[in-house]
Image: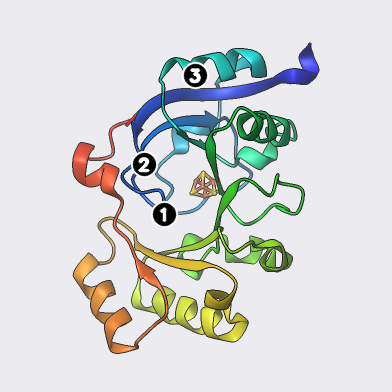
Amino acid sequence: MAAERLRITEIFHSIQGEADAIGWRTVFVRLTGCPLRCTWCDTTYSFYGGEWRAIDEILAEVASHGARHVCVTGGEPLAQKRCLILLQRLCDAGYEVSLETSGALDVSTVDPRVRKVVDLKAPDSGESARNLWSNLDHLLPHDQIKIVIASRADYEWARDVVAEHAIEQRCMVLFSPVWGNVEPRELAEWIIDDKLPVRFQLQLHKLLWNDAKGK
Ligand code: SF4
């Protein structure tokens, strides 16, 4: 049975705070561990610890919340190979499934029913060398690229990368400010001034619950 277990930091029921499923009641399954160390990471508590849980048990807990949307997140969920099985099982069970991933690991084997929210790490994250650019070739129209922006320099990097790879023609592109580093209004105005084909977003859960764990 060990082959069907995953290390889990938390499973909780909340409101999706970002990406295209924003606002939906959602069950979050947070897998433990991440090989990256983004400077502005807000889930460092997921790096270590956690609890081994059988996939059947995870599915039962998800079902107990009665939500249509499930978000598999981390940490970096794809760092545990059996995450792919969990994603497939959740899709088979009929949920609307999204996956939040760092963009540093291969997404080509993720079930195509899953909406992938793939980060591109801008320079101020300290992890932009980890961007796996081949992931752009595995995006489906329902997926999203998310770039978290901590400075004007990050913004210009993101703007140029989107243009260079015509990412908006592959899927939705999300620009999100780092809480406390970039004024949301400033980022919104940069996007307007440059007439960018991207979607501005604020993390709703931070507005609602001030980033409390398990929300
Ligand atoms: S990839 Fe995500 S979980 Fe990992 S360090 Fe960066 S922000 Fe944190």
Number of numbered callouts drawn: 3
Mark 1 or mark 3: which comes first in sequence?
1
Can residue 54 be seen at all in this image of the molecule? no
Q: Secondary structure at mark 2?
A: loop
Tell whether label 3 touches label 1 (CB within 8 Å): no
The residue at the point 55 percent across, 68 percent down is: 171
Q: Which mark is residue 16?
A: 2
Q: State which quadrant residue 12 falls in.
A: top left
Mark 3 or mark 2: which comes first in sequence?
2
The residue at the point 59 percent across, 85 percent down is: 164
- Label 1 environment density (alpha carbons within 10 Å; few <14, some 14–19, many ≥20): many
The residue at the point 61 percent across, 30 percent down is: 90
Q: Nearer the viewer, residue 183 or 96?
A: 96
Q: Residue furthest bottom?
A: 194
Q: Position of residue 104 (x, y in %)?
A: 65, 55
Q: Which mark is residue 63?
A: 3
Q: Which mark is residue 196?
A: none
| Label 3 C-beta lies within 8 Å of the nearest ligand 1 atom | no
Tell whether label 1 touches label 2 (CB within 8 Å): yes
- The amino acid at mark 1 is Ala
* Viewer-nearest of discs 3 and 2: 3
- Label 3 environment density (alpha carbons within 10 Å; few <14, some 14–19, many ≥20): some
Label 1, label 3: how far apart the Cα atoms are: 23 Å
**The C terminus is located in which quarter?**
top left
Q: Which residue is mark 1?
A: 19
Tell whether label 2 touches label 3 (CB within 8 Å): no
Q: Position of residue 117 (x, y in %)?
A: 53, 53
Residue 209 in the figure: left or right of residue 16: left
- The amino acid at mark 3 is Ala
- Label 2 environment density (alpha carbons within 10 Å; few <14, some 14–19, many ≥20): many
